[in-house]
Image (cartoon, grey):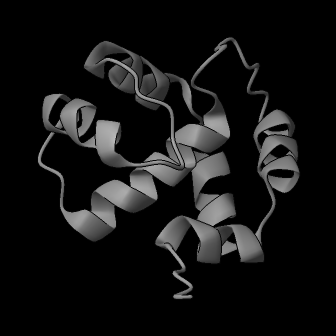
Amino acid sequence: MVQSNTLLDVFKSFISIEEIETILRSHDYDEVGRRWKGPDHIFFWLLVSSEQWQNYRDSENKLKFEPNLNTVVHTVLAKKARILPYEAVKEILEF
């Protein structure tokens, strides 16, 4: 049996979803999403940067093949990117 570790699995071994949510809340981020939450977008940004996805429309199509994340439309991706606090994202990635 072949064991495969994805980038998201490795990242999750360093910081849990609960820790991400705590950091986001500490920067006054109020979660409003139901299917696509702040931690999902952090994981999404990791994939985008590592796989060099071009834009949100391109990402919308590629998310269909990513089993660790929900599929959402590009407008949801753009909206979440606008409301996530930069300082929170920076703190999470420096964790």
Q: How many marks?
A: 0
Q: Quadrant of the C terminus?
A: bottom right
As drawn, the residue found furthest toward the front would be: 1
Question: Relative to residue 70, is residue 83 depicted above or below?
Answer: above
Image spot of residue 6 (x, y percent): 49, 73
Q: Quadrant of residue 10?
A: bottom right
Horizontal side of residue 9 vs 23, given as left or right: left
Q: Residue at x 51, y 81 (%)?
A: 4
Q: Residue at x 70, y 67 (%)?
A: 12
Q: Residue at x 14, y 37 (%)?
A: 58
Image spot of residue 56 (x, y percent): 22, 32
Horizontal side of residue 49 vs 56, given as left or right: right
Question: Relative to residue 32, is residue 54 depicted above or below?
Answer: below
Horizontal side of residue 10 vs 60, given as left or right: right
- In this rendered view, identify the residue nearer to me: 22 or 66: 66
- In this rendered view, identify the residue nearer to me: 25 or 57: 57
Q: Quadrant of the N terminus?
A: bottom right
Image spot of residue 92 (x, y percent): 67, 60
Question: Relative to residue 17, is residue 7 depicted above or below?
Answer: below
Question: Relative to residue 2, is residue 5 depicted above or below?
Answer: above
Q: Quadrant of residue 11?
A: bottom right
Image spot of residue 89 (x, y percent): 59, 51
